[in-house]
Amino acid sequence: RKEVEQDPGPFNVPEGATVAFNCTYSNSASQSFFWYRQDCRKEPKLLMSVYSSGNEDGRFTAQLNRASQYISLLIRDSKLSDSATYLCVVRSTGGFKTIFGAGTRLFVKA
Amino acid sequence: EAGVVQSPRYKIIEKKQPVAFWCNPISGHNTLYWYLQNLGQGPELLIRYENEEAVDDSQLPKDRFSAERLKGVDSTLKIQPAELGDSAVYLCASSLGTNTAEQFFGPGTRLTVL
């Protein structure tokens, strides 16, 4: 079993739709959680950190469920420019080990 | 401010040949990472430096891979000899420190081994 697992998708949604991705992690000692975005043939870039109480950044909402060991990303009012791969990232205690998931591909169509 | 710089951007070599990648991190970033990314997968850590010290190289295949960061700034990653399975994108990233939330990635070097 991989330490960080994501549904690879692809998710194909129309503009304006709401879409949600989940990510599960196996190490209960994991401490920090992030979502990165990676455009095709580009480098990953931080989208947002995920806080225990949940957090929102514009159309993006991230949530953490420590009991079930998963994090989620919700995108509201999808734009064409949201088309990308979304990488779930989990960091262990002390920040010594960072694990990237394989990513979930999103295609937003007009 | 300049981002993480990597060179070359693309490299095509024949198997058994050596290859080297270079990375210049963001100024002031003490932590430097080398990742390998295969198609359809997330980045996988090869080695992490704190200044000039390699603090995590547990995933680096040491029989053929080596890395250095002599002055705690630029870094090179070398493969000798390259194998067909080494074809991938090699990403360099940097951050202010290990516990800093954000890692900044360079554009990567796309390696093709024939």
Image: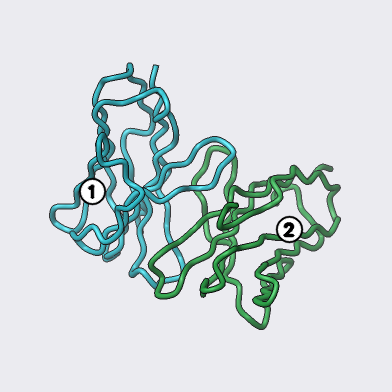
Chain where mark 2 sits = A
Three-letter amino acid code at disc 2?
A: Phe
Q: Nearer the viewer, mark 1 or mark 2?
A: 2
Q: Residue at x 51, y 51 (%)?
A: A44
Label number found at residue B75: 1
Label number found at residue B105: none
Residue A79 against residue A93 in the figure, above or below: above
Colour assigned to chain A in the rendering is green
Whole-percent x and y of residue A21?
Answer: 73, 58
Label number found at residue A21: 2
Left or right, A5 with respect to B109, comes to: right
Colour assigned to chain B in the rendering is cyan
Q: Residue at x 56, y 72 (%)?
A: A28
Whole-percent x and y of residue B47?
Answer: 32, 52
Q: For the N terminus of chain B, which image quadrant?
A: bottom left
Left or right, A27 with respect to B95, comes to: right
Which one is in front, A83 or B39?
B39
Farthest residue in the front direction?
A1
Whole-percent x and y of residue A48?
Answer: 59, 67
Q: Assess disc 2: are there few (<14), some (14-19) or many (≥20) residues with their C-alpha within 10 Å of its C-alpha.
A: many
Say which quarter of the image contains residue B6: top left
Left or right, A17 with respect to B28, comes to: right
Q: Residue at x 30, y 63 (%)?
A: B31
Three-letter amino acid code at disc 1?
A: Ser
Q: For the C terminus of chain B, which image quadrant?
A: top left
Q: CA distance from mark 1 to mark 2?
A: 35 Å
Colour approach in the figure: by chain
